[in-house]
Amino acid sequence: KAEVFCKENNCRFNVYTLSNNGFIEGRQNAVHLEQFRCWCARAGVEWVGGLGIGGGEMLRVLTLIYPWIILLGFCLSIFWLIKGAELNLKLFESPLRDIGIFSFFCFHFWFSLIAVSRDIRKDRKAKKNRFTRIIVPAAIFIVFADIFMVLSSLFKGRIIFTLLGKCKEPEK
């Protein structure tokens, strides 16, 4: 319907795409970005680039978990100050280290997002599609992703049925 609407109303706007399909590598979103490029060509709107994000589900998890970990670190630091510990920067070392580690592992993601934002703000076409993933080192990412997927499956209680179940034929 959107394609027909754009054709009928002679729409003229730019389409930037953030593709987050849950793949481990951001490059696996290339097909999705290509689909958007083709849709833009058919709808008569301007395709100007995209960002393929690998491990986007982990970003959601980390943005929920890390702030709580950091907040807990600061609360513990304040608790020790109230209990009479000397005002010492070592009290805030752990939460600040957590912020640094999170920022380091997500550096390429933030860099890519800023680059796409800059292109949008300056209303220009991206030179190329960008691809990134959350928690840049693959070895670390795969461990976290595996743990997350196992826990996600276990908490939904369907892991055995999902793994061993037969595929259902689509209804006609």
Image (cartoon, rainbow, N blue to C red):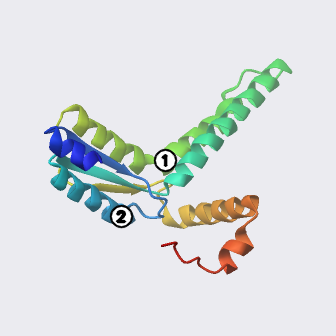
- Is 106 left, or right, of 166 in this rendering? left
In the rendered image, which quarter is residue 160 located in?
bottom right
| Mark 1 and mark 2: Cα distance apart in space | 21 Å
| Lower sequence index among marks 1 and 2 | 2
- In x, y percent, where is residue 36? 27, 55
Three-letter code for the amino acid on which mark 1 is drawn: Phe
The residue sitting at 69% across, 80% down in the picture is: 164
Specify whether residue 10 is in view: yes
- Helix, strand or loop for disc 2: helix
The residue sitting at 65% across, 43% down in the picture is: 65
Depth check, front residue: 129 or 134: 129
- In x, y percent, where is residue 47? 19, 49
Specify whether residue 125 is in view: no
Q: Which residue is mark 1?
A: 104
Q: Which residue is mark 2?
A: 27
Q: Is residue 144 above or below residue 63?
A: below
- In x, y percent, where is residue 138? 49, 65
